[in-house]
Amino acid sequence: MTGAIPVGLSGRPVRVGLDVGGTKIDAVAVSPDGDILARLRRPTGWGEEAVVVSIIDAVDALAVDGGFARSAVESVGVGIPGLVDADTGRVLHAVNLGVESLDLAGLAGRQLGIPVRVENDVKAAALGAAVLRGVDGSMAYLNLGTGVAAGIVIDGTIWRGARGTAGEVGHLSVDPNGRLCGCGQRGCIETFCGGGALARAWDRPGALPVRDILDAAEAGDERAAGLRADLFHGAAAAVRALVLSADVERVIIGGGLTSLGERLFAGVRRALQTGAEASPFMRSLHLDDRIELLPAGSPAAAFGAAVVGATTPSKEIVSHG
Amino acid sequence: MTGAIPVGLSGRPVRVGLDVGGTKIDAVAVSPDGDILARLRRPTGWGEEAVVVSIIDAVDALAVDGGFARSAVESVGVGIPGLVDADTGRVLHAVNLGVESLDLAGLAGRQLGIPVRVENDVKAAALGAAVLRGVDGSMAYLNLGTGVAAGIVIDGTIWRGARGTAGEVGHLSVDPNGRLCGCGQRGCIETFCGGGALARAWDRPGALPVRDILDAAEAGDERAAGLRADLFHGAAAAVRALVLSADVERVIIGGGLTSLGERLFAGVRRALQTGAEASPFMRSLHLDDRIELLPAGSPAAAFGAAVVGATTPSKEIVSHG
Ligand SMILES: [Zn+2]
Ligand SMILES: [Zn+2]
């Protein structure tokens, strides 16, 4: 592990980071040197109260696992899907968790007696990926999971944009005749490379539909080959959109589809190379050299949440400035 | 005019800004209060030497027109197409001007005896639009001319990105079956709403092909109606790409196609509204309320160049920091 994170004034040696997903919480305890002292996964409760309880329980379980007292925890950071007000720690519309409006930082912070900061999960993962991979300048984290979203980090800071939609490239349409997206548009990038959209288009039983698609494509299934091409094409389109709009130096791909490993990475690279063959302009961007893939099961999201927890809120920075 | 620009240490009262285009230079003299004291247009020479001469001549002519001595000029800023190293003032690959590699800041600065700063024309126009429209937070300037490009300004500063491609949304493909773009890809945003691409697709004689397309569409020509729909669709796609990637608060549309005025603005707004009707997510972004159109003939590009000239280079800021 690389990337030290700030030691607090109290000198407590542990930062906790939690990536709260629709079904499970990924929790890490991080030392001031950025080493992961303990890591565990636990199921997430459904609904506002249960989410808070799951978070408290995860911190307690992590302390037991890591062999440290809860009083050794300096801060807790939480990455969670939905609209997050990072200044107040309030979460809105986290539909996968049954959360409509929740003062997560306030409730969890009071129960734990430790400062809790909250961030959108993809933004937290972006920050975690930037620290873990030692990226100094600008980068985007492209999350390929059930859905598709990206977070942008510039010089070690999450780029928020004006209204929190920075990096929402999943819902850029790249084909007016493409599949209908859950958002109501046609041909969104997410309809090409989102795990949910691909599973619906494949429409066969199986625990890992996108893996099944790649396997079937390799075995000669034409429909699977079409969906595999969509996957690579969509991810390449997302990379282009991030570089041509925000001009990030690197794009780091994470999310559930990273379990496909080299097959995913090689396919996206090839799609970018094919695009570059047709276009001198694209060739000049060297996009195929600017992407990387997180290893399957990377703790980037939980680690990033720990970094979020270690960060002074922007409001405090402003008021002291 | 709104937006004061910095008075230099010398206290000289005039900032000159030049927007150097393929056929003409738009030149303004600006007071410290941001008032435009004089403005003129002159033809641009072809080739490296001639471009420098045109710039010197434009400054001289502006001084005559504005009734001030050249010694009253504190700084000169130049916006120019092509790859610009804003720190050194060197211009590369300005193909429309016959420039391959030119130390423009050095040559013009020595001949004028005044500091000259150089910036990419679209980035300079973006800065000018931000100052003229009094935009505080984040905005993109979407230039609809022969080609399509955008510049991003955050808190009054040009957003450069990692390699200078920030805002290059013109070459995002939004239709795999679309028209072939000059860049080699199919269905680039520029093939939908670039004046050059529309003129080629229309392929009838006329001084203002895009205006002819709108006129013919209003008279019932079906092919013209299709191209008109492309124009509005492409501009709307550019707005979406800028907001969903970089999450700018506002998008200000400028460039040659602004001569179409309200017909352009209403069409782009309608395209954004139609997209929002189909998509609750798009509806939540209120894109139709976040665009504005510069008036035809706006001095934004030349004014922005004057602001560039008044700005301390980032290298100096860093070395003093
Ligand atoms: Zn969508
Ligand atoms: Zn193109």
Image: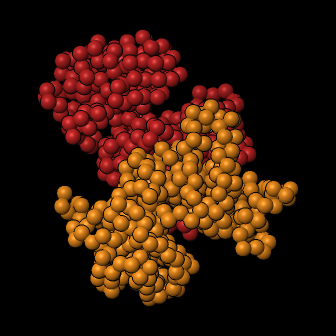
Chain colours: A red, B orange
* Residue B273 is at least partly visible in this image: yes
Residue A225 picture location, percent across and down: 68, 46
User: In this orientation, which residue lies closer to the viewer: A149 or B88?
Assistant: B88
Q: Which residue of the protein is positioned furthest toward the front in this rendering? A: B67
Left or right, B293 with reference to B197: left
In the rendered image, the vertical position of residue B268 relative to residue B27, given as above or below: above
To which quarter of the image does residue A40 belong?
top left
Task: From the viewer's perspective, tell me whether residue B118 is left or right of residue A142.
Answer: left
Q: Position of residue B305 (x, y in %)?
A: 41, 67
Residue at 25% in and 25% down = A75
Residue at the image position 56 percent from the left and 47 percent from the top: B291
Of residue B275 and residue B179, the one placed in the foreground of this image is: B275
Query: Could you say where residue A38 lies in the image, as x and y percent from the top left?
Result: 28, 26
Residue A55 appears left or right of A291:
left
Q: Look at the picture and state if B318 lies above or below B116.
A: above
Query: Which image quarter is the C terminus of chain B in?
Result: bottom left
Residue A305 falls in which quadrant of the image?
Answer: top left
Q: Quadrant of the N terminus of chain B?
A: bottom left
Residue at 39% across, 67% down: B30
Q: Residue at x 34, y 15 (%)?
A: A107
Q: Quadrant of residue B2?
A: bottom left
Residue A261 in view: no
- Foreground residue among B235 and A118: B235
> How many numbered discs?
0
Closest to the observer, B199 or A202: B199
Q: Position of residue A253 (x, y in %)?
A: 46, 44
